[in-house]
Amino acid sequence: MGYTWGEAAAVDTQQQQDALMASAFATPFYRHHWVTKPKAWHELPILRDSDLKAGRQNFPENVFGGRLTIPERNLLYIWPPSGALKPDISIYMGMTDDERTHWVDVMTRQWTILGLGAEDVVQVLSWSNDPFVAVLTTAVGGASAYGSPAVDELLGILTVRLELVPSEARRTLATAELLHPAALFADSAHVEAVCQLLGTKTLADLGYRSVVLRSVEWADAKTRIKREKEWQIPVRRILEIPYALGYGLDCERNPEGVHFARDHYLIEVTDDDGHTVTETTGYLTITPLFLRSHPIIRYQSSIKGHFAQHACGCLDDGWLFIPESEGP
Amino acid sequence: MKGAFAMKSYWDQTIQTMRPEEVRERQLKLLRRQIQYVYDRAPFYRDLYDRHGLKPHQIQTWDDFRKRVPVFHKDDLRDYQKRTGDPFSGLLCVPRSQLVGLWTSSGTTGLPTLGAYTRTDMATAIEYMTRSYWDAGVRPGQRAFLININFHWLMPLTWGMSRRLGLRPLLFDFGHAMMAERIAQWILDYRPDVIPSITTELATLVPVALRKMGYDPAGVLQDVKMITTMGEALTDTARSNLQLEWGGVTVRDGAGCGEGYVWMFEGSCEHPGAHYWGDIGYVEVLDPDTGEITGEPVGRGELVASNLLVQGVPYVRFGTEDYVEIYDDHCERMGHPYGRILGRSNWRVRVRGEDFLPYDVENVIQRYPETRKAEFFITREAEMQDTLTVSIAYDRDLTRDPDKLLQSLSHALENELRVPVAITWVQPSEIPRPVPHKLQKFVDRSKNH
């Protein structure tokens, strides 16, 4: 008697869901949000930004709004993913060393799929309140001898940390001219600013093999093709759900869709009432299974879309989610 | 604070309490080793030393070191880079595969140059940073508010220090002045004990933002035990202002040179200035007019840095273009040298035979609430000029009579600096900002004349 791989993965996911539900229900936030002890996953109320903000007000003892399952001192970093200029109640996130390791795993796979490997140089544009760099760059997140390696060290890549604002395009260009990076992780405004400084040169002339758009904005397939023509370089996209530590990568074979690592994220599509839908359009709803310190369970993003009805032809056996909106 | 942490006043007592002569002995030993190391591995140094007829074995004494080892500057690195196409300007001493991180200079004085860390280098750098913060009184478990710049050399070191010390860090983005209100909100949310790196400009603006939001800044900020200012030399006036506005907070100033592993950070000593760790970096002072190194590494001049332990990208006698003052006095607590960085050495304006830096002006104008933000620049009109010209932006909300303020400021500056001063009012947007987190408080017009 044994399991096939798919069955074993399903059992594993179920176990992770059960563990998450149990630990979440021990927190004041989820006791309040769920009201009664949950029996089945699909009965759980979905979670929206407004719920998380209400948590900040209802449970003001720390910045996690009643969601912490562990002492705050056990977190490696705490950050508010919202932009620094939005005057609103901030939602805070954090990560433990173990959660960082899971996240490193997610991103290492993505970089491998993107064809990045030993001896490549990669420019990563980020905000410094954004733990993306802590995951990607040993120089930041692993802090040398005191932590586990990040994506770049695992893959033998050198990363250049840069600031994700168009006014810093000159620095991006200057380091590209010196190091000929294989990829640039940026948002489209920054890439535009770099292209304007290039003159008659192209990004490919500097050695870039691809641009990876990292942003909560989602460029649809048409926009992606348009940018590929303008920038004369392959463009890939990461779909980021910052309040769920969610990072999906567009599918090389079906570029209109996004894959999330299925052993790290549970992806659903839900409607306005929070019910699961399978064949129609709804909102991308995500649960990071590895996030135990302050669980985010069935987080409904504002990204609309649907699941592909057929198995994706690529090697990824995860769900292919096809976004339809430009995102939040 | 309980137990051993409360008792331990030094992070590394053996190293920190070395006597000055022990520090010097160690420095010479490490410099000799480093000169051999770079000569064997780095094409830039082999080229430089061969051109100067220098062989590493010729360096046996301090006298040999001072007379024979050439000083180089960033322009020499840029030239080498242009000539050879080597992004590391011939300084890299290890295979690229051993590097775990790159960083770029801030680009204040031109195109940014590259720096890099091996794992060991990073551990060294984090060690000196941790030692400094411990000496300043930061302790495990404290809530820290980390304001950083993504490309900057300080960011990995501050994050690493935070992990090494067991702080509880909240990450914050780019310390740009326009984010003051957001920072104020997050300080209200998180109630940090320590803010390890904040520009003086931003530290000045946070209380203003809190006041606008309807809070009493001193009441909110009195829970913050310490802030450390970075980015430009902290004047005595700015320090007093910050202490007042932040409800009695301890203000420590820090400045350094990423390439040289020289980090001057105010710790628990009571003397003015800040120690740098002499077992990791060596500092000399160069007279920017003559290009000569002063006999003993004390006095005012350009900071020349050598890192003593670095494996990846070592710098030996690197002219940093920072203007520094190294004190001659000995400290009772620690045998490591101390001083302070006052600005950039090419930001000096010579008026009637005396050199002035933006620092000198800032110290005076910050005494006035209307110019407390220190949005100004001084102008070099000629190699030698009769009048110090200063362009200042005043706070429109606080200024009733600009003419009267101008008169008062001129009088105060002339009284303090003992030279004629000409002030022009400008808009804040007219102050050059080469990188978003820094105002450039110096403009050179001498070449236009």
Image (cartoon, rainbow, N blue to C red):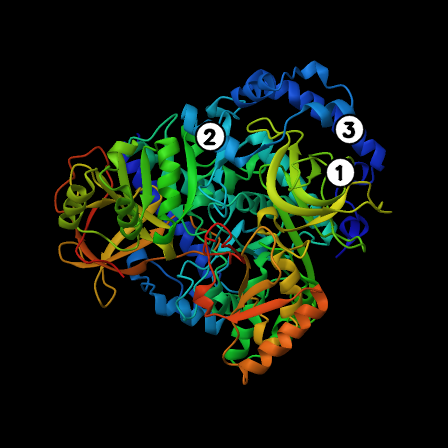
Residue on which disc 3 sits: B26
Chain letter of disc 2 in the image = B
Q: Which mark is residue B210?
A: none
Q: Nearer the viewer, residue B90 or B413?
A: B413
Q: Is residue A29 above or below residue B346?
A: below
**Which amino acid, by three-letter code, is at mark 3?**
Arg
Q: Which residue is mark 1?
A: B297
Report the Cα–Cα distance between label 2 and label 3. 33 Å
Q: Quadrant of the N terminus of chain B?
A: bottom right
Same subunit: marks 2 and 1:
yes
Q: List x then y, in percent, for residue B47.
A: 54, 19
Q: Check disc 1 and give the amino acid type.
A: Pro
- Quadrant position of residue B312: top right
Q: Is residue B191 above or below residue B312?
A: below
- Who comes first in sequence, dot 2 or dot 3? 3
Give the CA separation, mark 2 to mark 1.
28 Å
Element type at mark 1: loop
Which tag is nearer the camera, tag 3 or tag 1?
1
Q: Secondary structure at mark 3?
A: helix
Relative side of B439 to B343, left or right: left
Does label 3 or label 1 sit earlier along the sequence?
3
Residue at the disc numbered 2: B79
Q: Amino acid at mark 2?
A: Asp
Q: Residues within 10 Å of mark 2 (few under 14, many from 20)?
A: few
Residues at circles 3 and 1 in contact by the CB criterion of under 8 Å: no
User: Who is closer to the viewer here, B92 or B369?
Assistant: B369
